[in-house]
Image (cartoon, helix red, strand yellow):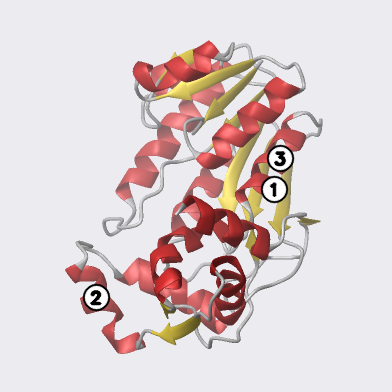
Amino acid sequence: MYAITGITGKVGGIVARTLLAAGLPVRGVVRDADKGRPWADKGCEVAVASISDAAGLTSAFSDVDGVFLMTPPDFDPEPGFPKTHQAIAAVKAAIAAAQPAKVVFLSTVGAQVTEFNLLNNSKITEEGLRTVPVPVAFLRAAWFMENASWDVAAAKAGIIPSFLQPLDHPIPMVATTDIGSTAAELLRESWTGLRIVELEGPRRYSANDVAAGFAEAVGHPVRMEPVPRDTWEALFRSQGMKHPPARIRMIDGFNQGWIDFEGIGAEHRIGKTPLEAVLKDLAVQG
């Protein structure tokens, strides 16, 4: 039995479907029982627990061969990341009580970076998981290629506002299908202690590569338009963000190169899915 958090999302869903296709039992961990019904129809057990519910997580993580752990995204964290600290405290208590055979945590490229930025969420969670009494793997995934879903309408119009700058600066990216399949592989492996597994796509991609991929997908020219750095905070606040500095510093980190993989002491894996294939699917869906 494998407990899968985030099963209603893209990556968690891929993990679950991959395990089910291999004939392995899955327990989906959901915050709302109604959201678990489609997975129950697929033959999954369903456990109801939020990421900060230690008792619920203990039940969900009990008697399993592995846990796939995702924490809900918080793109606008309060200073000090209080929700993340609350969540990892509950997760640690649940793991200590339930003693699952292993845990695979979906982390991120740059989780090791000490400088303040949005990815400190994953750094805090990693630090908490380093002390749990079961084998743990940090799956540090690159920038999601599917982040470009926000740009489909702009691509169809021909001009995409870009926060990734310079436009020809490549960064590590990866498709969610590769993240999910890699996580499923890790859950079926055995190890002791801590593993760090870095995952990126077949090559690195720039904003201009995203424009070229969309151009091919939509059948007309597409270009990137850099969003001036000094307008970001006001823009994000106008979109409803209350605490934009963490997000701004994350983008700075990718643009300036100080958010990247750690390398030393980590395994490095390469996904199979090219950016162009993901963008084509997004354009069709959008």
Is tag 1's residue or tag 2's residue first in the polypeptide sequence?
1
Percent coordinates x, y for residue 162 in the rendering: 43, 79
Q: Which mark is residue 235?
A: 2
Q: Amino acid at mark 2?
A: Leu
Q: Is residue 152 above or below residue 186?
A: below
Which residue is located at x 31 percent, y 55 percent?
77
Q: Name the residue nearer the viewer: 187 or 18.
A: 18
Q: Which mark is residue 181?
A: 3
In contact (CB < 8 Å): disc 3 and disc 2:
no
CA distance for labels 3 and 1:
5 Å
In contact (CB < 8 Å): disc 3 and disc 1:
yes
CA distance for labels 3 and 2:
36 Å
Q: Name the residue nearer the viewer: 201 or 148.
A: 148
Q: Is residue 81 visible?
A: yes
- Total count of labels: 3
Q: Which mark is residue 178?
A: 1
Q: Is residue 191 above or below residue 98?
A: below
Q: Amino acid at mark 3?
A: Ser
